[in-house]
Image: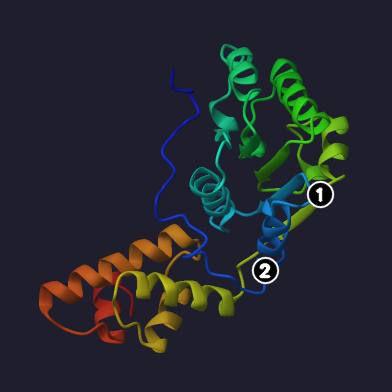
Amino acid sequence: MQLFFDFPVKPQYTFANFVICSGNSTAVQFVRRVMAPDSGENLLYLHGATGSGRTHLLSAISSDLAGCSPGSQSSIIPLEAVTEENCGSVVEQAGVRTHLLLDNLHLLADSSLLRSAVWQLFNDFYESGRKIIATATLPPKELKSLDEHLQSRFMWGLVAKLDISDDESRRMILGKLAADRQIMLPSEVSDYLLVHVRRDIPSLAAALELLKQRSFAVQKKISLKLAREVLGQG
């Protein structure tokens, strides 16, 4: 029976195409430590704003486990999908897995029943020495959706913030997005996008896709002039 949280892992979310920069290098280092076969680290908490790469890393971990760890069983559990009606099933089905991957802890509904369910899952995995990796927008102590006991437990492990808000990181990511689309992105166009487009990764990727489509349609290289035409900015 398919687990309700077994949604497809996006194939583009891999370690190979994750752009490492100063704002996320610690998170990547901690992921490698936790995932190392002989590692004694079993608990990792990643936090960062929407678009910072939290879900990308978690999906990459899930894909890597499926392909490289015989016998491993892991599923990403999006906490926004856990309800009072299905939480019992979630605990039961997830409990037999080898790894616990919790995405979007900040979206857990305000319910004592759900907090108890997450607490039970955490304890079952932690006490049995199985690995737990969780993500949220905020650090554990600021996450109001969790009780104080679970906030403290997450701080027992590795905690890392992903922050790609600086221009250097965004330029690196824009360069990777452009390379993935096999397009040449002049530096002045990259700078223009950082000023005139929302700075989250999905918005930047969408802008690049529009530029690519227009470039192909009019048979012109991507330029500052073309970017202004496509995005409607002066």
Query: Mark 2 falls on what kind of element?
Result: helix
Percent of width and height locating residue 102: 63, 37
Residue lying farthest to the front in this orientation: 70
Q: Is residue 11 left or right of residue 46?
A: left
Q: Is residue 109 positioned above or below 214 on the image? A: above
Q: Is residue 181 left or right of residue 217?
A: right
Image disc number at residue 25 = 2
Q: Quadrant of the C terminus?
A: bottom left
Q: Is residue 59 left or right of residue 113?
A: left
Query: Mark 1 falls on what kind of element?
Result: loop
Q: Is residue 224 positioned above or below 195 on the image? A: below
Decide which of 151, 37 is in the foreground and name it: 37
Percent of width and height locating residue 179: 36, 75
Q: Could you classify mark 2 by the number of other residues whose Cα lies within 10 Å: few (under 14), some (14-19), or many (20 or more)?
A: some
The residue wearing badge 1 is 40
Image disc number at residue 125 = none
Percent of width and height locating residue 159: 78, 53
Name the front one of labels 2 and 1: 1
Q: Is residue 230 positioned above or below 41 on the image? A: below
Decide which of 198, 213 is in the foreground and name it: 213
- State the image quarter where residue 120 is shown: top right
Decide which of 39, 171 is in the foreground and name it: 39
Could you tell which of marks 2 and 1 lies nearer the N-terminus? 2
Residue drawn at x 33%, y 75% is 233
Residue drawn at x 59%, y 52% is 54
